[in-house]
Image (tube, grey):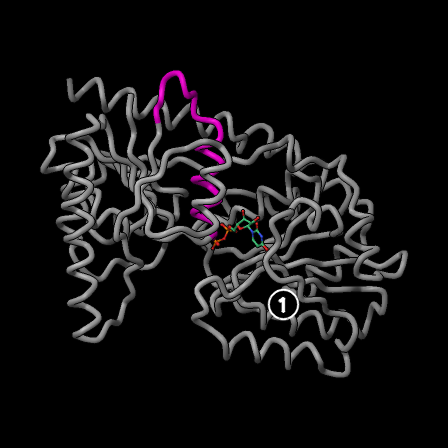
Amino acid sequence: MRVLYLNHVSSMGGAEHSLLELLKRVPRDEVEPVVALPEGGPLASHLRSISIEIVTASLVRLKLRLGLLRAFKTGLRILGARRKLSRFVEAREIDLLHANSVSSHFVAGPVGKSQGRPVVWHVRDLRPIPIARGMLGQTATRIIAISQAVRRSLLDQGFPEDKIVVLYNGVDTARFHPGRSGGTERGRLNVPSGSFVFGMIAQMVPWKRHDLFLAAASEIAVRYPHARFWIVGDDVFADHPDYVASLRAQSSSPALSGKVSFLGYREDIEAVIAGLEALVLPSDAEPFGRVLIEAMAMGKPVIATRAGGPPEILEEGHHGYLTNPGDRNELYQAMARMIEEPERSHNMGTAARRHVEDCFSIDRHVAATVSLYRELVEQGR
Ligand code: UDP
């Protein structure tokens, strides 16, 4: 079957990493993928490197607040993309469309409807959708929610229950493996031997709460002088320069000076994770949190928040710790415990790896996705 995937950006966030992992493994004798993207960027390069066809379309990243002129231009671009992709779907006899985001479903939904093709809409967000909910719901044949938390949020917004399926993201357990050595990264950053490295891997956007991580870190650093802190990732859309500047200022406080490293965006994220003792993700609410399954697959214990997807991914006290969102003291306690109880932390990492193998393997994710395609394409025949 021929599947047209749509993504609204070509930069690499979690949604794009998940799409790429799926596309690397869809059985090509059964699924012929084509990906519609806006002009070139890192995602396009990754796709080319695995020989996946790309069709350029004026897909746009929808923002909550747009001025009148921007809204008008965005509307025109969406209409342009719908026209171009409708023709493409017809000419290439596409069997199914798969929209990888809310923004891309603004195009995929109407195109699928007008061409009579099933549409899978992948929802990877917890943020409420402010407009066009009726159209988005009606034009989706099936809605994939990446966690029960996302499913609940969709139900609260009135999306049809019978269309929603929960499908967790998957991770490549060979690439993210506990056997990998973290020595290179630690050496590169001159981490003294015997240090305990906490890492936060996330886009530099305020809701991820790097500020909270650094606030807890500044207390940890006083009590445990051998603790070090890595901040990995970028402000992908350059939307939050002030936030990034404030984090740099926070990290140069006397308690943290020389102990925080900003690694920027890293393609070789597994090499970075290998260098950590524990991963910290103190977000206000993660829809899922792919870095959690990546770190867990590498045998690292994790600290995340009791909100959104993480409580579905890790079991409290068994694979790591959950803290209340925004609670700096609880975060500090969890980080201190990781250091104080090394054997328990190590055992949690080992259990985390097993848990990911059982529940979050990429093979499982791919098999469930392809089986959904099969069901929908057969229904349509
Ligand atoms: N990531 C990466 N390099 C970085 C920072 C992040 O490859 O420097 C990847 C990370 O490994 C994960 C994804 O980006 O696969 C982030 O996904 P997650 O669900 O954690 O967050 P999102 O960006 O979707 O909010």
Q: Residues within 10 Å of mark 1 (few under 14, many from 20)?
A: many
The segment highlighted magenta reads: 12-32
Quadrant (top left, top right, bottom left, bottom right) of the N terminus: top left
Q: Left or right: 121 with respect to 199?
A: left
Give the camera-side residue of 335 and 276: 276
Closer to the camera, 31 or 310?
31
The C terminus sits in image quarter: top left
Q: Secondary structure at mark 1?
A: helix
Q: Is residue 10 magenta?
A: no
Residue in view at x 20 percent, y 57 percent: 77
Extreme-left residue of the structure: 114
What residue is pinned by disc 1?
213
Which residue is depicted at the point 58% across and 42% down? 293
Q: Indicate the position of residue 93 as horizontal and vertical percent values.
A: 19, 25
378 to the left or right of 153: left
Residue 329, picture quadrant: bottom right
Residue 46, position in %: x, y?
A: 49, 41
- Using residue 103 as the reference point, say whether residue 287 is left or right of it: right
Three-letter code, disc 1: Phe
**Image-quadrant location for residue 379:** top left
Residue in the foreground of this view, choosing between 342 and 53: 53
- Whether residue 24 appears in magenta in the rendering, the answer is yes
